[in-house]
Image (cartoon, grey):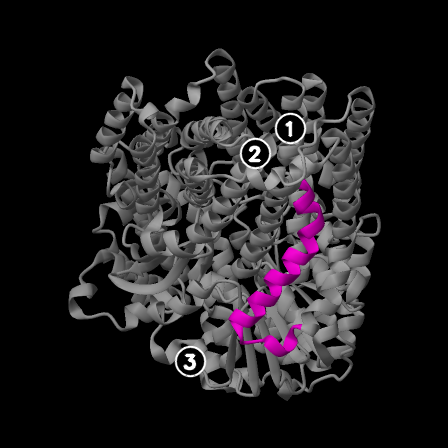
């Protein structure tokens, strides 16, 4: 029976983790994915488990047949668990509007969320909380030793949870969808129920105590230290899990699979710990007297695992850690030791508690109630108190100290704990506490994600905040000692930048729909980032009201720290800020908007995919006013081709006039409308270029003429429906459709590559029904020549400049065939922000050769070639810039018609580099600018 019930409980554990994953996913659709909503769903789930534990402690002994009762519980979990997965999305459709009056009353809203979460999860989570006490009683009633049974069942159930955590993410959800996976989990529960039912028929009923017996065996004073210890160990492990995941988030790519692997490591540690304690108790029934030593060892392991982090992180350098194997290489040494000892401690504490309580059900019920309650509080405290107040490093140290406190508690109250082994463990713990590596977080760990995203030696960290949702790092991006932009790093990833190229595509989400809309009055922005899109919205005077929604309070609070008051969009009186999940906000608001736009994290990031599904796009469509427009980010740099097809299919299923546009490189834009049919005039279309503030920014990011916007066109609904005709849309039930091999930076998939073909895009623009309906006719023809310059911009910004392609030729094309300045600056390593700094530089800065290079490039972009020669000559004084400045100077001579001088200078520079004994820098610069391989350069020098 022990073997059979262990196998059954293994299947139950796997099902429980699958269901838990699905419930949290679906609850996010109903209650939102904000940090408060997610935490309250977890609290509701843990509260249900604790209730089940309490019921087992109070009435578990009254059940005549615990195995048969367990079978009923598994059926209840299967039925109600599946019902939740199917029903929670439907709940979302009426719950958010019902809670609408509570908007802005955070505590009251979150109280309602907690009540709803607890009520929804009550039956399955309570049933789960009853299972371990019932099976433990069933086996101990048959004569098995309590401690060995508890550790074995606990281990098998947790090991099943490891399987459930991994298989749901790697196989089930992708193949079967959310609902199909729920049916698989329910089948595992039903299988466990059937197995338990068959076993129950073969065994007699358990002994039932006489009436009133349950009250007589409530935990007494002798059990209190063990209940406190169980509570604290549960608190610590869940708190540490939150801290560990945040710490690993600095190095590991944020994906749902990454989270599943990290969770599996913790669960595996607990399971193996349970097995080890069961074996220990089988050999030594009094092993629980060593529990204090185990607590000291757990505290020492917390410190040792953190102190050793530089060793197991070193092989990865600054690279993002991707893939289950790589995550395990850093996750196991960090989390497994303390998780293992936690599993040991739980089992030993149960055995000790059983010695103080003459009832198996009361012992297990009380133990799990205390442990689960501690875990629920620990997860909340870690997210809302420890991390934002103390930070990761101090939280680890505090957790270690509290583990030591548990050891001291047991030493003080249980004399049997004072053995030599326990005292040695306490001494090791004390040494670890004394040697804690304070400052490692700042001096080593935080520098890894920072170094990963620094783009210049002048860049510097502006501020760091370990917030409730994530670790935020703001980098000050500088040139010539002056800030030109900021970069926001959240955990391991750069989530936003306000540099010139990023602003180009982020601002486009406002510029294009505002150009096409006759009178935009109400705007909604989902996801704030560094505020570039928000700034474009607030710069538009026609908007009377602007709602900005972001899930991170910290990002919104830090906006004034990285922006001057005059540049902070959140200070605009028209702006209303909502700290909320964007999807939940759309479900709850009654307002309709003329423009809805957004740039959330990439869809493959953990917890984000439901902001790219057909159901989300339907919500957006419902909140658009008649004629309203929706612009949205499509990041093909982080979405596979199948994933981008699924998003396009979902978007076009909702927006009949869907279109796709270039932003910058692989940051594209989707645009759809709610029945827009009123064509604006050419004068209305160009009104943003007549606003001095907006016009300045339009020019800075390369939209120097209104007709340039047309050249960003890739395709309309006719084209997009054709390329996705065989693709299924991304929907809530199949969130894994967005996943696939991460695109390589040096490659484009066939579909993505086809979007760089501006000749075909021009023809699609000519014949587009969308363009014919909304674009001013005179601007349609005026846009066509700009597809040629867009071809050059695509080649540059997609990061795939072909070998042998000449930047000099492309720059010459821009300078001779257009009136544009920005593309010439980009081709030669500058932009409008750099040129602004050059124009405002003081005398000391003007002596810098880097200043001279930027000055010379700016003069080239203005077609003032002769004037550019002297600054470029001075720029050659910087050895690191010598070759590049020489190449641009040669180019400027050619553009000025002074080809003989260019030829002589090229030979002089080649001879100078040759005498220096290293031609590599020169060849590289000449190849980059002129597209020539070294043999071709040598031939050119010869004549």
Of residues 273 and 676, the one nearer the viewer is: 273
Of residues 393 and 893, the one nearer the viewer is: 393
Gap in angstroms between the C-alphas marked 3 and 2: 56 Å
Taking the spot 61% from the left edge, 48% from the top edge, the residue there is 51
Taking the spot 60% from the left edge, 76% from the top edge, the residue there is 102
Taking the spot 23% from the left edge, 26% from the top edge, the residue there is 427
Q: Position of residue 5 (x, y in %)?
A: 70, 23
Closest to the camera, between mark 3 and mark 1, is 1
**Residue that label 3 marks:** 571
The answer to whether mark 2 and mark 1 are in CB contact below 8 A is yes
Q: Earlier in the sequence, mark 3 or mark 2?
A: 2
**Residue 828 visible here:** no
| Mark 3 neighbour class, 10 Å CA radius: few under 14, some 14 to 19, many 20 or more | some
Query: Relative to 427, is 241 above or below?
Result: below
Q: Position of residue 354 (x, y in %)?
A: 51, 29
Q: Residue furthest left?
A: 844
Query: Is disc 2 placed on a helix, strand or loop?
Result: helix
Query: Relative to 671, is 80 above or below?
Result: above
Of residues 682 and 589, the one nearer the viewer is: 589
Q: Is residue 700 left or right of residue 11?
A: left
Q: Quadrant of residue 593?
A: bottom right
Q: Residue furthest front?
A: 211
Query: Relative to 530, is 803 above or below?
Result: above
- Residue 137, disc: 1
**Residue that label 2 marks:** 364
Of residues 322 and 270, the one nearer the viewer is: 270
Q: Position of residue 907 (x, y in %)?
A: 31, 43
The number of callouts visible is: 3
Per the rendered image, the range of residues in magenta is 99-128
């Amino acid at each position: 029976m022990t073997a059979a019930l262990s196998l059954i409980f293994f299947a139950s554990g796997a099902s429980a983790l699958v269901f838990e994953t699905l419930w949290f996913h679906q609850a996010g659709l109903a209650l939102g994915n904000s940090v408060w909503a997610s935490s309250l769903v977890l609290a509701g789930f843990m509260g249900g488990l604790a209730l089940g534990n309490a019921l087992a402690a109070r009435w578990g002994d009254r059940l005549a047949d615990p195995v048969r009762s367990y079978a009923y519980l598994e059926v209840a979990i299967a039925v109600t668990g599946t019902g939740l997965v199917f029903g929670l999305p439907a709940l979302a459709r009426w719950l958010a509007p019902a809670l609408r009056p509570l908007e802005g009353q955070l505590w009251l809203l979150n109280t309602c969320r907690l009540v709803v979460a607890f009520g929804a999860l009550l039956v399955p989570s309570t049933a789960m909380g009853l299972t371990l006490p019932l099976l433990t009683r069933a086996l101990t009633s048959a004569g098995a030793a309590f401690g060995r049974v508890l550790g074995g069942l606990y281990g098998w159930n947790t090991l099943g949870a490891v399987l459930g955590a991994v298989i749901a993410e790697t196989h089930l959800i992708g193949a079967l969808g959310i609902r199909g996976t729920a049916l698989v989990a329910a089948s595992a529960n039903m299988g466990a129920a059937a197995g338990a039912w068959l076993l129950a028929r073969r065994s007699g009923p358990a002994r039932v105590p006489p009436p009133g017996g349950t009250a007589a065996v409530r935990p007494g004073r002798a059990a209190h230290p063990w209940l406190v210890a169980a509570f604290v160990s549960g608190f610590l492990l869940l708190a540490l899990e939150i801290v560990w995941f945040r710490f690993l988030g600095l190095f590991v790519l944020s994906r749902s699979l990454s989270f599943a692997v990290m969770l599996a490591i913790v669960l595996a540690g607990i399971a193996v710990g349970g097995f080890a304690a069961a074996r220990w108790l089988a050999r030594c029934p009094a092993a629980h007297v060593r529990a204090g030593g185990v607590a000291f060892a757990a505290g020492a392991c917390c410190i040792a695992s953190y102190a050793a982090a530089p060793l197991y992180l070193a092989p990865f350098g600054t690279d993002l850690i991707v893939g289950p194997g790589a995550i395990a290489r850093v996750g196991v040494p960090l989390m497994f030791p303390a998780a293992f000892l936690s599993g040991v401690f739980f089992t030993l504490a149960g055995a000790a508690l059983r010695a103080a309580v003459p009832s198996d059900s009361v012992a297990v019920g009380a133990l799990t109630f205390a442990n689960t309650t501690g875990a629920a509080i620990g997860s909340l405290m870690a997210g809302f108190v420890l991390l934002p107040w103390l930070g990761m490093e101090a939280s680890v140290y505090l957790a270690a100290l509290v583990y030591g406190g548990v050891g001291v508690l047991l030493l003080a109250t249980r004399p049997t704990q004072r053995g030599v082994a326990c005292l040695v463990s306490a001494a090791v713990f004390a040494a670890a506490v004394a040697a804690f590596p304070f400052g490692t977080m700042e001096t080593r760990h935080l520098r890894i994600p920072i170094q990963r995203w620094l783009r210049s030696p002048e860049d510097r960290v502006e501020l760091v905040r370990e917030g409730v949702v994530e670790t935020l790092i703001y980098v000050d991006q500088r040139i010539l000692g002056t800030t030109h932009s900021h970069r926001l790093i959240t955990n391991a990833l750069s989530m936003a930048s306000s540099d010139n190229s990023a602003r180009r595509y982020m601002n486009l989400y406002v510029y294009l729909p505002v150009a096409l809309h006759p009178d935009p009055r109400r705007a909604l922005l989902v996801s704030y980032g560094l505020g570039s899109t928000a700034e474009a919205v607030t710069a538009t005077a026609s908007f009377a009201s602007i709602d900005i929604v972001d899930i991170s309070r910290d990002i919104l609070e830090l906006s004034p720290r990285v922006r001057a008051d005059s540049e902070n969009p959140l200070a605009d009186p028209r702006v209303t800020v909502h700290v909320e999940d964007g999807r939940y906000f759309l479900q709850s608001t009654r307002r309709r908007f003329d423009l809805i736009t957004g740039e959330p994290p990439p869809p493959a990031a953990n917890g984000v995919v439901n902001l790219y599904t057909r159901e989300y796009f339907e919500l957006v469509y419902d909140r658009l006013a008649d004629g309203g427009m929706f612009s949205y980010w499509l990041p093909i740099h982080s979405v596979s081709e199948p994933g981008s097809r699924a998003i396009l299919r979902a978007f076009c299923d909702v927006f009949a006039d869907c279109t796709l546009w270039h932003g910058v490189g692989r940051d594209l834009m989707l645009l759809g409308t709610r029945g827009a049919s009123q064509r604006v005039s050419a004068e209305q279309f160009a009104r943003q270029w007549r606003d001095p503030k907006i016009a300045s920014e339009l020019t800075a990011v390369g939209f120097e003429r209104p007709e340039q916007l047309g050249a960003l066109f890739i395709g309309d609904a006719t084209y997009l429906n054709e390329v996705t005709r065989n693709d299924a849309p991304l929907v809530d039930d199949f969130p894994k459709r967005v996943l696939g091999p991460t695109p390589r930076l040096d490659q484009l998939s066939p579909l993505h590559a086809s979007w760089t073909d501006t000749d075909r895009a021009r023809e699609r623009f000519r014949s587009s029904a969308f363009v014919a309906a909304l674009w001013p006719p005179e601007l349609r023809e005026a846009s066509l020549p700009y597809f040629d310059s867009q071809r050059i911009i695509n080649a540059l910004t997609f990061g795939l400049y072909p070998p042998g392609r000449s930047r000099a030729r492309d720059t010459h094309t821009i300078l001779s065939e257009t009136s544009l300045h920005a593309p010439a600056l980009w081709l030669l390593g500058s932009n409008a922000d750099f040129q602004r700094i050059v124009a405002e530089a003081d005398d000391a800065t003007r002596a810098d050769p880097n200043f001279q290079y930027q000055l010379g490039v700016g003069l080239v972009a203005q077609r003032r070639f002769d004037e550019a020669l002297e600054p470029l000559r001075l720029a050659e004084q910087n050895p690191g810039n010598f070759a590049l400045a020489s190449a641009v100077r040669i180019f400027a001579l050619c553009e000025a018609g002074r080809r003989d001088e260019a030829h002589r200078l090229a030979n002089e520079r080649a001879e100078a580099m040759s005498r220096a004994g290293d031609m590599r820098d020169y060849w590289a610069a000449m190849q980059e600018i002129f597209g020539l391989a070294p043999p071709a350069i040598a031939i050119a020098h010869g004549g």
